[in-house]
Image: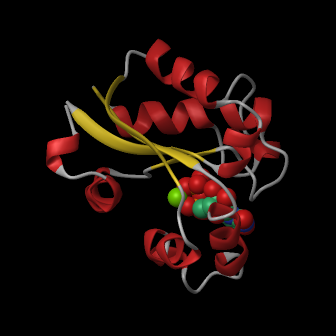
Amino acid sequence: MERTLSIVKPDGVKKNLIGEVIRRFEQKGLRIAGLRLINLSQTEAKKFYIVHKERPFYESLTSFMSEGPIVVMVLEGENAVAKVRETMGATNFKDAAPGTIRADFATDIERNVVHGSDSVKSADYEIPFFFSSLDLH
Ligand code: UDP
Ligand code: MG
């Protein structure tokens, strides 16, 4: 059993894709252990994406992530990290496999609808960033 963090990014929320994203995860057999609709400040987004602080897209990414509400969720199941990444598709929607969330709904490399932890180690940082253990079920 594994837990991972996923986010419906501001573009996904604006396009009314919250239900669609959750449906796809549930269809893969993943269980929702925690779920919230929140606004991030750019300062918080910068902390969340601290691993990318040297990358050229850091400012733009963190500005985008704070432009409107996002849905943060914890998904639980066997191989949850890999299952969420598979369901999302590649970072660049042009490389994303057909039928993945990003292939179907992303409009550019930045505005790619969803986030998912890339490893169990990342999930161990990202889950407590948003959820206390009392908020996980
Ligand atoms: N991103 C971007 N330009 C790039 C690479 C990434 O704007 O060249 C954005 C994109 O929104 C991506 C996020 O930064 O989802 C985090 O990048 P990462 O490489 O961790 O991709 P992910 O794990 O989300 O697939
Ligand atoms: Mg990543």
**Residue 55 rendering spot, x and y as whole percentages:** 63, 81
Q: Residue at x 67, y 31 (%)?
A: 101
Residue ranking furthest to the left = 134
**Residue 115 rendering spot, x and y as whole percentages:** 55, 48
Residue 35 appears left or right of 46: left
Assign the C terminus to one quadrant of the image. Answer: top left
Residue 109 appears left or right of 55: right
Q: Residue at x 77, y 56 (%)?
A: 109
**Residue 127 rendering spot, x and y as whole percentages:** 31, 52
* Above or below, comparing residue 63 to residue 132 in the picture: below
Assign the N terminus to one quadrant of the image. Answer: top left
Color style of the picture? secondary structure
Q: Residue at x 67, y 50 (%)?
A: 10
Please name whichever residue, 67 or 120, is drawn nearer the observer in this view of the structure: 67
Residue 59 appears left or right of 104: left
Residue ranking furthest to the bottom = 54
Q: Quadrant of residue 93?
A: top right
* Above or below, comparing residue 44 to residue 121 in the picture: below
Q: Residue at x 55, y 71 (%)?
A: 41
Q: What is the total number of numbered labels drawn onto the structure image?
A: 0
Please name whichever residue, 53 or 72, is drawn nearer the observer in this view of the structure: 72
**Residue 5 rendering spot, x and y as whole percentages:** 39, 46
